[in-house]
Image (cartoon, rainbow, N blue to C red):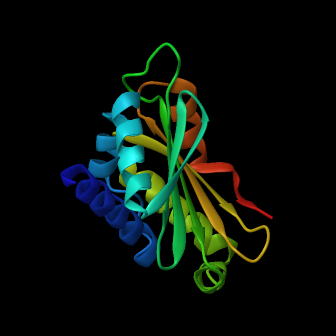
Amino acid sequence: MRKLKFYIATLLIITSSYVHSFEILSKKETERTFNKTLIEWKIDATILSASGMGEVVQSNEISVTMIAFLTSSILKVTPAYSKENLIRPWKISVAVEQNKELSKLTKQLGEDGMRQLVYKWHREMLPEYTVMTEFDLIGETLQINFNIFEYGKNQIIDNVGKETQGCWQGCIKK
């Protein structure tokens, strides 16, 4: 039960940090996720699912996504493990699917405003992490996709992040 409370608190911190004040995931929560083994992640997923406060999607034996349904959005978190390393993920993917009302507010920022958020999030997570972000504007609901990498582990990703300031494939997908 203690782990469940911790995980729910973590989801709320992540979501409130981003959705309500337009802040990126905290470094502390990102570090915790990078420090979870696949087994620990699966245990947390089982606890979340059993609590009824979220769902879990497992696409294969090493890909487990936790989904939390929040007031103004759906939060999806997937650490990416390799078959060679089940101790530490090489990437964390986070998607925030906003409801229609919040999507309208975010879209009002315009493309320049959204890009400025991407640049800000990228800077906030340095020097520990490289964050690549994309806004998916297709349809009525907006989804923001974050791919988080530990800085220094993949020079190509770090260089692309530096060159684009975290703007993944143009940042804005229409």
Dividing the picture into quadrants, the one containing residue 31 is: top left
Task: Say how many tags the image has.
Answer: 0
Left or right of 69 in this view: 30: left
In depth, the one of 34 and 160 nearer the eye is: 34
Dividing the picture into quadrants, the one containing residue 24 is: bottom left
Above or below, 11 relative to 122: below
Task: Tell me which residue sits at (49%, 27%) in the image.
Answer: 81
In depth, the one of 82 and 38 nearer the eye is: 38
Q: Position of residue 41 (x, y in %)?
A: 38, 38
Above or below, 69 relative to 46: below
Task: Tell me which residue sits at (28%, 54%) in the image.
Answer: 4
Above or below, 150 relative to 131: above
Q: Residue pushed farthest top? A: 84
In depth, the one of 145 and 73 nearer the eye is: 73
Q: Position of residue 126 (x, y in %)?
A: 37, 45
Assign the N terminus to one quadrant of the image.
Answer: bottom left
Left or right of 57 in this view: 47: left
Q: Position of residue 94 (x, y in %)?
A: 52, 51
Assign the C terminus to one quadrant of the image.
Answer: bottom right
Q: Position of residue 92 (x, y in %)?
A: 48, 41
Task: Tell me which residue sits at (40%, 41%) in the image.
Answer: 129
Q: Residue pushed farthest left? A: 2
